[in-house]
Image (cartoon, helix red, strand yellow):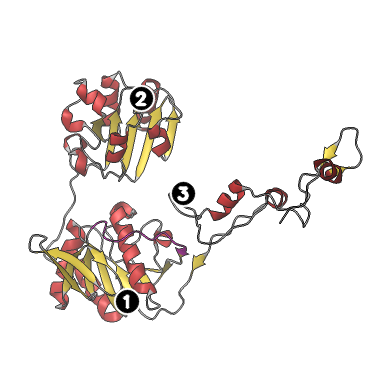
Amino acid sequence: MSRPRKNPRTERAARRVEGGARPRFDLAATAKETGRPRRDPRAEERLALVPGTARRRLDRTQRIAVTAVSQASVPVAEAAPTVRIIAEPAYLVAVVPDAPSGRLTPHDRQLLGAARLLADIGGGAVLALAEADDLASAGADRVLALPVTGYDPEARALALQAILAGLDIRHALFPESPDGGDLARRLAALTGEELFAGAESLSPKAVTRAAQGRRVEQRRAPPRLISLAADAVAAHGGERHEARAVEFGFPDVEPGAILSAEFIPADPAKVSLAEAEFVVSAGNGVSDFNAFRALVAALNATPGASRVVCDAGLMPRAAQVGASGTVLEANCYFALGIAGAPQHLQGVARCEHVVAVNTDLHAAMIERAGLAVVADAQQVMPALLKLLDEEAGG
């Protein structure tokens, strides 16, 4: 079998646009039916890109055939964001997130992802029992805020008991955290229902957890009350949901034993890096450590450092961030003058937000950061201190 021989001069003449002093050619002209269309791998990759994901993902399950000329001539319109609406759910899966200060933690997002698994299997909907940001993209179909302010776990447990009795709740999920675990056990004691605490894996058919010093595994069908350990289920990464606010008539609750309570924040300078929420780290690009310590104090953050700085004795070994130091789970990590060695990047992999300042545009930490400033850290620190002082009215 032989292919027809191409004549480039004839093809060039066919693509020439008549008129004009200079020769012009229409490169979007289609190839002849007898020839093979030229593939554009970049266009195919753009079409295979899965939108709405934090990390770059490609869908190779379908064969994509796109010619370079068709991609150049027809612009690809961006798909409008879709919202999934479940008008009449068969049942509800309640989620009680911690949501400190109205912000979903990674554990809360995993909880909503687990609720989606239990709801989608039978046409149910996910009910988030808290007001927080970004509930729609996290997978919530309904939102109902508990009428409890401040720290009152007894009143929260009574409100949840009323919700379980008044709504068609098939499952209620709690994070296995200090507050979430305490609330789940209080609710189990009030209702007399069994609580499957510390589930390490969850599916519509079974929940499992380790027992007896992790020598055995307990498995059973998902009960009504479940507390989920961290990293047991992936967070919801699909389409947005409605997150519609619903109303519920809560009964009047008499004042409990706790009349007043408040959280006293710890000194961030004395908090261990493993428990810190906001960490500011110094790297080899920082030479003025007096300005660095002043900036850490002004930001009310926990100080950290790279291995190079700790090896030089400029910061204590307890402040080292990385695989050979401390692995962080902070809400925000601010790296000053840190290039980003692989061991250091392992230490910040679980941080929700990363801000980096470095003079090297191609540094690994700049690539990892959600917000990057390509500048000298020695110039950025006094500028930040000045802005913070102006905001404080100094």
Q: Residue 56: give its label.
A: 3
| Quadrant in the picture for the C terminus | top left
Tag 3's secondary structure?
loop
> Does label 3 or label 2 sit earlier along the sequence?
3
Residue pictured at 14% horizontal, 60% vertical: 259
Specify start and end residues of the magenta stretch as a single range: 230-240
Q: Tag 3: residue type? A: Arg
Contact, mark 3 vs mark 1 (Cβ under 8 Å): no
How packed is label 1: few (under 14 Cα within 10 Å), some, or many (20 or more)?
few
Tag 2's secondary structure?
helix
> Does label 2 or label 1 sit earlier along the sequence?
1
> Does label 3 or label 1 sit earlier along the sequence?
3
Q: Tag 2: residue type? A: Met
How far apart are the alpha carbons under marks 2 and 1?
52 Å
The residue beneath circle 2 is 381
How far apart are the alpha carbons under marks 3 and 2?
33 Å
- Closest to the observer, 186 or 105: 105
Tag nearer the camera, 2 or 1? 2
- Closest to the observer, 19 or 165: 19
- Closest to the observer, 168 or 366: 366
Residue pictured at 49% horizontal, 53% vertical: 58
How packed is label 3: few (under 14 Cα within 10 Å), some, or many (20 or more)?
few
Tag nearer the camera, 3 or 1? 3
Please say if 309 is above or below 72: above
